Image (cartoon, rainbow, N blue to C red):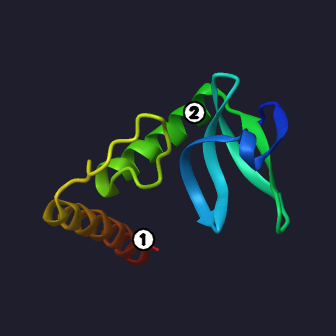
Amino acid sequence: MIQGKMHYLPYDDVKFVFVLDYYDLPLKATCRYQGRLCLAVLEDWQADDANYFVYELDWKEKLKYKYLQRKWEFISGTDWSRSEAWIINDRLPKWFTKRLWRFYFDLQRKKINDKRRSG
């Protein structure tokens, strides 16, 4: 649960860093607000405008969201990252990405099977 201060901003004022959930617009994303890493959550979406609640994050939450961003960028690339220094074609080779995903899902499958056997 997010404990930090909350601000209310229109879509145009939100400077997105990493999109966590998307459906026509970012539903949940990390953003920069007053020089700090924050979490933006879509609150209200009308046909002509969108408004976000922007929550300030503590150090644990910042670490969590930066970890999620780095993990995603390592496996899939920077398609969901937004910054002024956006680098095009910085993806890993396709064969390597497939192996990483296969490894990740094999681990998840193993965890599920271990839980079923023990429970």
Query: Can residue 1 be seen in the rendering of this structure?
Result: no
Q: Is residue 35 left or right of residue 69?
A: right
Q: Is residue 64 left or right of residue 78?
A: right
What is the x, y in percent for residue 93?
16, 58
24 or 28, nearer to the observer: 24
Q: Residue at x 60, y 63 (%)?
A: 22
Q: Which secondary structure, mark 2?
A: helix
Q: Residue at x 42, y 70 (%)?
A: 115
Q: Quadrant of the N terminus?
A: top right
The residue lying furthest to the top in this view is 35
User: Which labelled disc corresponds to residue 62?
Assistant: 2
Q: Nearer the viewer, mark 1 or mark 2?
A: 2
Identify the residue position indicated by label 1 in the image. Answer: 115
Amino acid marked by disc 2: Lys
Q: Is residue 40 left or right of residue 66?
A: right
- For the residues marked 1 and 2, what is the alpha-carbon distance in whole angstroms? 30 Å
50 or 52, nearer to the observer: 50
Q: Quadrant of residue 3?
A: top right
67 or 42, nearer to the observer: 42
Q: In the figure, 106 relative to 52: above or below?
A: below
Q: Is residue 56 left or right of residue 102?
A: right
Q: Residue at x 33, y 42 (%)?
A: 87
Q: In the figure, 54 relative to 45: above or below?
A: above
Amino acid marked by disc 1: Lys
What is the x, y in percent for residue 35?
64, 22
Q: Which secondary structure, mark 1?
A: helix
4 or 53, nearer to the observer: 53
What is the x, y in percent for residue 108?
36, 67
